[in-house]
Image (cartoon, grey):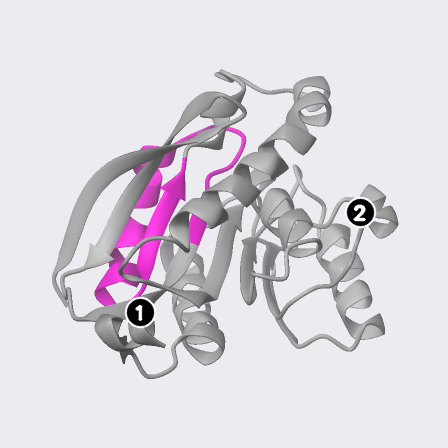
């Protein structure tokens, strides 16, 4: 399916926040949306390839520049701790913006995140009932969220066993939470893989992510005019 790329923005906390848009070229349908979050290195440019591939499969994909909210250019543990709640509010505002778009089915929204972005995705899904699925690459669920968690949705966990940045124990902790709450999940731990995927690991993880999002978000498309009337 052909893909249209563009950029738009919305307001969060009085700041203009950019969204890179990757949309299927079909004005007659509403599509499931995926809001994608990069990791602590920023690197939104590296998100273009996976976003384009997802859009070609029938998803409206929005890469969120959540660092815009705090003017962040580099991060450390202190900066992350200070800004994490503000970034979560930015994710909430991004979802509010995305579900109002004419080509998006507001009842089919997923989050996809890498590392820090994955932590934000999981934390946001723990309090936002609008989120139907999360794909998390080498991230985790902050322990503090146990005090704020209201719910969770199906989660795909993808992690390297030898990750020196986000230990694989984070993946196992998340699995325990999901099992305890009887929430659907899938998990793939890659032996001898560190933080960040490439080569065959990246290809396998991408196929798993696509299959998972199709399972939980990709219902038959409904004509946009019909959804407006209903």
Q: Which residue is mark 2?
A: 145
**How many numbered circles are shown?**
2
Q: How far from the left and from the top, in percent, is residue 183?
A: 72, 75
Q: Are marks 1 and 2 in contact (CB under 8 Å)?
A: no
- The tag on residue 190 is none
- The tag on residue 228 is 1
Which residue is drawn at the image coordinates 39% and 50% (left, top)? 98
| Residue lying at the far front of the rendered structure | 229
Q: Left or right: where does residue 198 sit relative to residue 128?
A: left
Above or below, 229 against 191 in this view is: below
Which residue is drawn at the image coordinates 74% and 51% (left, top)? 170
Hey, which quadrant is residue 2 in on the image?
A: bottom left
Above or below, 80 against 36 in this view is: above
109 or 188, which lies in front?
109
Which residue is drawn at the image coordinates 66% and 19% (left, top)? 79
**For numbered disc 2, what is the local secondary structure?**
helix
193 or 27, which lies in front?
27
Q: Left or right: where does residue 53 sit relative to residue 80?
A: left
Above or below, 191 against 15 in this view is: below
* Magenta span contains residue 197: no
Q: Which residues are magenta?
A: 35-64
**For numbered disc 1, what is the local secondary structure?**
helix
């Amino acid at each position: 399916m052909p893909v249209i790329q563009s950029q738009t923005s919305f307001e969060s906390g009085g700041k203009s926040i950019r969204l890179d848009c990757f949309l299927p070229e079909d004005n007659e349908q509403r599509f499931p949306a995926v809001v994608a979050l990069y990791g602590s290195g920023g690197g939104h440019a590296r998100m273009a390839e996976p976003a384009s591939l997802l859009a070609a499969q029938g998803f409206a994909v929005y890469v969120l520049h959540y660092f815009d909210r705090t003017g962040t250019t580099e991060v450390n543990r202190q900066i992350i701790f200070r800004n994490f709640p503000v970034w979560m509010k930015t994710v909430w505002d991004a979802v509010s913006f995305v579900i109002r778009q004419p080509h998006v089915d507001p009842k089919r929204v997923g989050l996809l995140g890498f590392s820090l972005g994955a932590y934000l995705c999981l934390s946001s899904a723990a309090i936002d009932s609008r989120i139907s699925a999360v794909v998390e690459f080498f991230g985790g669920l902050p322990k503090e969220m146990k005090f704020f968690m209201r719910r969770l949705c199906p989660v795909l966990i993808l992690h390297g066993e030898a990750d020196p940045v986000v230990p694989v124990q984070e993946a196992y902790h998340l699995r325990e939470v999901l099992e305890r709450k009887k929430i659907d999940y899938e998990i793939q731990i890659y032996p001898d893989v560190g933080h960040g995927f490439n080569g065959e690991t990246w290809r396998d993880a991408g196929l798993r992510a696509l299959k998972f999002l199709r399972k939980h978000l990709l219902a038959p498309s409904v004509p946009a005019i019909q959804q407006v009337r209903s």
